[in-house]
Amino acid sequence: MSESEEKAYSREELAMTLFEHVGEFRRRLIWVLVVLVLGMIIGLFLADPAYDYLMKQEPVAGLPLHAFSLWDGISMYMKFALVIALILVIPVAFYQMWAFVKPALRVNEQRAALGFVPMALVLFLLGLSFSYFIVFPMAFEFTTGVARHLDLEETYGITQYFTFMFNILIPISLLFELPIVIMFLTKLRILTPIRLRKMRRIAYLILIIIGTMITPPDFISDLLVAVPLILLYEVSLLLSGVVYRKQLKADAAWEEEFAKGSI
């Protein structure tokens, strides 16, 4: 085989490998989308009890909500269905991500990375609890306080209320996945603690901007969200360091074993 034929063959082999990876990624993504759709169907059935529970809790307990459009009731059901579907799809998405990169991992790394799947669900639920029980009441009190200060008559629509609530809950809950994502990327050797330390200032700025975007325009609410997000980044950095040090030890042990075998 000539040199030109060898190069053509290698390019063809590389293209086949790339198409195989794209096909595998597409199959994994389809599974995630299927679970998302099934989760939304389940969420539609669970929307009524979830709605009844939330309507009995502060700050909305006793507050009359109105429908300003024929679509408001349906919109409420879809919002609840999406949040419930996210609870189901988060571990599935992380499992599919793990299954996609599994062939590139060693056996011990495969077991360690698989442990990220339940942790992802736990962190999402923690983020959901933090945003609902701490951030959302403060945001609600601030906005309604401004309305009362201006002597405005408070008439809230059901769509406006739950849109306001879920616009706070969903982003914060997803941001709580940051430690898992960073650990996973460190496990894949895409990120390192050194790179994360260099990115610290930019990361802080991005997290603060996100915190100010999803909270009311007052310093206390911004601080209440930005500080936990920054702490999450620091925790992610520490966890990344743990994973990275284990990788270095494993690499050193493998090199030592390889050197002995060569001798």
Image (cartoon, helix red, strand yellow):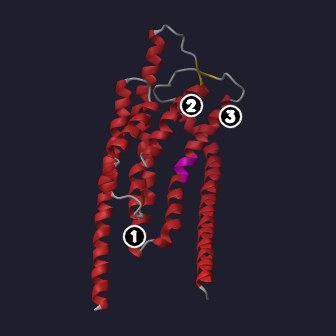
Examine the structure image and report whether residue 123 is included in the region drawn in magenta.
no
> Which quadrant of the rendered structure holds the N terminus?
bottom right
Q: Amino acid at mark 3?
A: Ile
Say if 193 sits above or below 18 in the image.
Answer: above
Label 2: element kind:
helix
For the residues labelled 1 and 3, the Cα–Cα distance comes to 45 Å
Q: Are marks 2 and 1 in contact (CB under 8 Å)?
A: no
Tell me, for residue 74, which label it has, or none.
3
Which residue is the site of mark 1? Answer: 109
Within-10-Å neighbours for mark 2: few <14, some 14–19, many 20+: some
State the image quarter where residue 12 is shown.
bottom right
Say if 186 sits above or below 137 in the image.
Answer: below
Which residue is the site of mark 2? Answer: 163
* Mark 3 or 2, nearer chain start: 3
Tell me: 105 left or right of 5. Answer: left
Within-10-Å neighbours for mark 1: few <14, some 14–19, many 20+: some
* Mark 1 or 3, nearer chain start: 3
